[in-house]
């Protein structure tokens, strides 16, 4: 793959999944949304559970993509039903840059500031930016973020990300904006340039977990998107080692 005249060899034989799966509690949760549930379908004497004597497993799954695990969202998240993730991004294979950023104190808890981001990298060299916030405990995979003032991205940092040409942003946070901001959603609006010049092909992916074993740098990346005709859907993000040719 080639980015800015630099060609990379991507090793597809060594995938690293940074997804937090949608699963029954206890698992990551945010915004006071109910946890995902998996209940056997029942009708008459039929039960969709092998454990309960049924012939097959057949679950009725209830979930809220924005709070129940890794999910990818499109501009429809703030613009409404005229924009659907299914119609803007169904899959993606390209190059990503992984950056680890120290969180800093702010009025609403911790945040990714412009200074901290620029201390981690002077430039973004790929259309996909993955931000791993520090510290990075494994407990992020089951964090109960609701009411806990989760970290967010400061609008100045988000504007710099957009200015760097990032098309797809991937973060280990439940949102790029504060949990409570009166509905302003400033960083969402900046990223999608809504409503003045909407970047309808761009996406934000939240609630990933990037293991500490993965070094900062360039990776091949693939997105797998559940085919929901909605603003957001559960997704899988996979990284692959990349080396300059």
Image: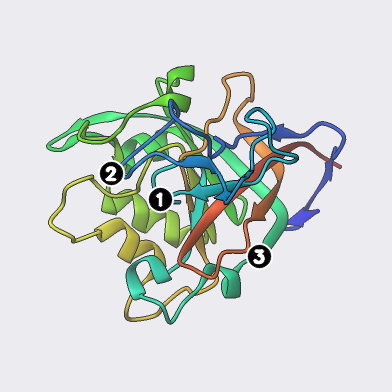
Residue located at (55% from left, 51% from top) = 234
Residue located at (64% from left, 25% from top) = 214
Which is nearer the N-term, disc 3 or disc 2?
Answer: 2
Q: Is residue 37 above or below residue 202?
A: above
Please tell me whether mark 2 sits on a helix, a strand or a loop.
Answer: loop
**Disc 3: which residue:** 90
Q: Is residue 51 above or below residue 175?
A: above
Residue located at (39% from left, 44% from top) = 67
Which is nearer the N-term, disc 3 or disc 1?
Answer: 1
Marking on residue 31: 2
Q: Is residue 19 visible?
A: yes
Question: Could you say where residue 191 lies in the image, as x and y percent from the top left?
Answer: 39, 62
Q: Is residue 124 visible?
A: no
- Taking the image as shown, residue 153 lies to the left or right of residue 244, namely left
Q: Is residue 98 above or below residue 72?
A: above
Mark 2 and mark 1 in contact? Answer it, CB < 8 Å.
Answer: yes
Please tell me whether mark 3 sits on a helix, a strand or a loop.
Answer: loop
**Disc 1: which residue:** 66
Residue located at (43% from left, 19% from top) = 139
Question: Could you say where residue 114 lies in the image, as x and y percent from the top left?
Answer: 32, 43
């Amino acid at each position: 793959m080639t980015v800015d005249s630099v060609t990379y060899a991507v090793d597809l034989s060594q995938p690293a999944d940074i997804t937090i799966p949608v699963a029954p509690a206890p698992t990551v949760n945010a915004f006071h949304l109910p946890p995902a549930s998996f209940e056997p379908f029942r009708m008459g004497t039929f039960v969709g559970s092998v454990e309960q004597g049924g012939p097959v497993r057949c679950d009725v799954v209830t979930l809220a993509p924005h709070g129940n695990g890794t999910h990818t969202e499109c501009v429809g998240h703030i613009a409404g039903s005229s924009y659907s993730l299914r119609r803007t991004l169904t899959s993606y294979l390209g190059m990503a840059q992984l950056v680890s950023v120290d969180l800093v104190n702010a009025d609403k808890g911790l945040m990714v500031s412009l200074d901290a981001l620029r201390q981690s990298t002077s430039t973004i060299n790929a259309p996909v930016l993955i931000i791993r916030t520090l510290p990075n405990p494994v407990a992020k995979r089951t964090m109960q973020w609701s009411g806990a003032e989760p970290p967010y991205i400061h609008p100045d940092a988000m504007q710099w990300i957009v200015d760097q040409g990032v098309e797809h942003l991937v973060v280990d946070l439940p949102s790029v904006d504060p949990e409570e901001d009166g509905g302003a959603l400033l960083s969402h609006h900046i990223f999608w340039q809504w409503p003045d010049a909407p970047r309808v092909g761009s996406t934000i992916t939240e609630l990933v977990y990037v293991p500490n074993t993965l070094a900062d740098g360039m990776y091949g990346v693939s997105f797998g998107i559940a085919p929901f005709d909605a603003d957001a859907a559960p997704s899988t993000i996979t990284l692959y080692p990349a080396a300059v040719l």
